Image (spheres, rainbow, N blue to C red):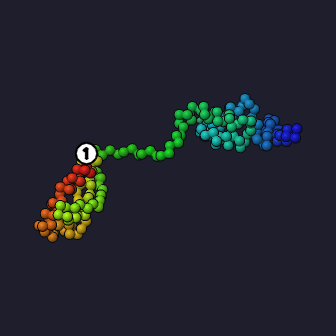
Amino acid sequence: MEKLAKEEGKYSTQLVEDTKVLCRENKLVIPKKLQHRAVQWYHHYLQHPGHTRLEETLRATMHWKGMRNTVRAYVKKCRSCQVNKRRTLKYGKLPTKIVITQPWECLCVDLIGPYTLRGKDGSEIDFMCLTMIDPATSWFEIVKFPISEHEFDILKGTKGQKGKDKHIQSMQPYFDKMSATVG
Ligand SMILES: [Zn+2]
């Protein structure tokens, strides 16, 4: 009995534009046959919000029992929401690839290494490599990248020593092998 009295205390009637309406805690009580239309109107004019936001919006100004169910059922059935439903992807989409068709229009380069090669005589050579790929033709090139000043000088020809040149030449098969492996 007490509970019912408390419930009744929540209801009141107010005049809205000369029409007597029933309110519950100052919120408009929507009769059963208008509930669906209210949901429909709000869902349409708020541009298809999800059931949570739609329910919160409705709840701010109106009341009916089982509003949550009405709202959820409506949103679930909304054709537009079904078609354009936001998928909860946990990853982004890759941007479309810009295809390069002109050979050498673009060159993809990378530095790999450092590597250490050991010759038959036990000598070692440390080096890095520069890789180049032409994305249009997939042509691949790899060159040894000198890292020591001495080697750089030899390549430039400023301090060309025949013996050392031979040493680098003896490493050539290794570079070729690597080139074939990486390529
Ligand atoms: Zn919708």
Residue type at mark 1 is Thr
Residue at the left extreme, as displayed: 162
Q: Residue furthest right?
A: 1
Q: Residue at x 79, y 36 (%)?
A: 21
Q: Write the residue at 53% across / 34% down.
A: 83
Mark 1: C-beta under 8 Å from nearest atom of ligand 1: no
| x and y, in percent, of residue 126 in the image | 25, 64
Residue lying at 20% horizontally and 64% vertically, measured from the top left? 122
Q: Secondary structure at mark 1?
A: loop
Whether residue 28 is visible: yes
Quarter of the picture containing the N terminus is: top right
| 6 is higher (above) or lower (below) than 112 | above
Quarter of the rendering containing residue 9: top right
Q: Nearer the viewer, residue 19 or 108?
A: 108
Residue at 30% across, 56% down? 110
Residue bearing mark 1: 137
Q: Residue 129, percent across and down?
A: 26, 58
Looking at the picture, does residue 132 appear above or below residue 163?
A: above
User: Could you tell me if residue 15 is visible in this image?
Assistant: no
> Based on the displayed image, in which of its 4 quarters is residue 71 positioned?
top right
